[in-house]
Image (cartoon, grey):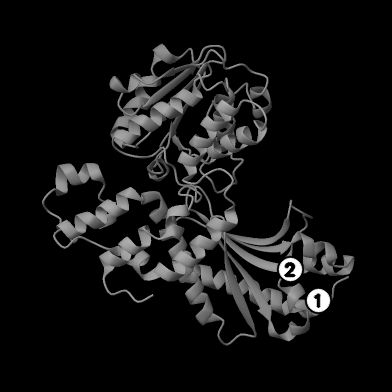
Amino acid sequence: MTTTNFHESLNELVTDARFRSLALTKNFESFLDIYGINEAETMHTFSWFMAPKGSHGFNDVFMKEFLTNAWTMIHGQYGAHTKTFASSKFYTNLSPVAFQHTSFMNTFIDRDMVKEVAGADIVITDVATKVLVVINNKFNQAHCDKAVAYFGAEKFNFFENKIFVSFDGEAQASTGSQWMYMNNEWLINVCANLIEGQQGGNWKANGIVKEYYQFLTGTPWGTSHEQFAEASATLIADYYDVITTLKTYKTEVNPGVALIDINPREYATTYFGKVSQKEYEILSLYWSHRNTFNTFFQAAELEAATKNLAKTIEGKSYGIDRTYIRNGLSFTPSFAAYRADKAFMNTIFDVEMVWDMNKNLNIGLVVNKASWDKLTAVQRHAIKKDFGFTSDLLNDRVTVASTFFKQDWKNQDLTKVVTNYFDKVHGYLGNIGVRVA
């Protein structure tokens, strides 16, 4: 794509039908973390679903799922690299199994506490289980520290199980923070499960939760992920320059401030009159589609790794095909030495680069299960031995190696890991043979 005018190109991007159809939160972004009047509306809607006696008719389903997902994070079930709260005393006598047999029908949802304690947007208490949950929408260190101190006081000692949850990813960056970041991935999954379970049942409730699902994901229920992946792939290819330019764009008047870091509230109180009309128009576009752009920024970074990778393997005896998958990219090798078996080889090994809810990145060398089942026992044994893994199968693939990067990952590092994996695969293919069993 030839970019003649950055602002025009940006407008062209946000009006593109593919852009409009993307699920805005499919990359773990959280719609609950927003500013302005929509902030109050969103939190009221969320608290309504959480209320067990709400008119939605789902009883305490949302409350149970919320607690289950929080328990999972507290006990590190999302992986050793995710920030966990294993030292927390929360859920000392509870577990995900116990949640399904525990009634939370008398849980109280308080939206007014925020007037007394800034940072406590929702306070959830359940006397029967002695649970107290404080939810924060926009993380502010000073306000959140005061909230922890307030609810940690003696008058709240009755509640043995306390946890502080923020919908703002900034909580992750706070050193020593007692606030746990939860995005709305779990909420999307709850809606999906309820929709699937409601078929032929309560159509009014089904319609309500479908609308909520659409709000959370930005797309109607039933839209397949393949559509998102295809739209992401073609949009990144067509608008790579304008997306990367937007990420680095800075104001002329305030060169030390990244334009995209200015939010509407800061603009109104600090930068009003200090940015040009053209810059404000760009800001408005970003604010209107922030979750989508944040997703694209991450995808564009991985696309840069693809460009580096293409240069790195120019002199090697294999090529790669790149496809978008949920929350990342997948690379499939094509080995010149095994042309006769290319169709089969292209289904055996892949390298997947996937980022998690905290923007950490994991690179894994995976074996497709369908292809794995076609290998002989000797071939499987050789792969296990050569790649140093012993576990058999996951649901649809075998992970034979993985490398983890924290949020500050660099494209050069990713390229090195991917090429090392493919070099190792290439080196061992001759030993295991490539014919289908």
Quarter of the N terminus within the rendering = bottom left
The residue drawn where x is 60% and y is 62% is 352
Q: Say what secondary structure mark 1 lies in.
A: loop
Mark 2 = which residue? 348
Q: Residues within 10 Å of mark 2 (few under 14, many from 20)?
A: many
Viewer-nearest residue: 432 or 185: 185
Q: Residue furthest bottom?
A: 315
Q: Picture coordinates of residue 209 (x, y %)?
A: 53, 32
- N-terminal label among 1 and 2: 2
Q: Please, is residue 105 above or below residue 240 in the view?
A: above
Amino acid type, mark 2: Ile
Mark 1 = which residue? 434
Q: Say what secondary structure mark 2 lies in.
A: loop
Is residue 75 visible in the rendered structure shown here? no
Q: CA distance from mark 1 to mark 2?
A: 9 Å
Quarter of the view holding residue 402: bottom right
Amino acid type, mark 1: Val
Q: Are marks 1 and 2 in contact (CB under 8 Å)?
A: yes
Is residue 105 visible in the rendered structure shown here? yes
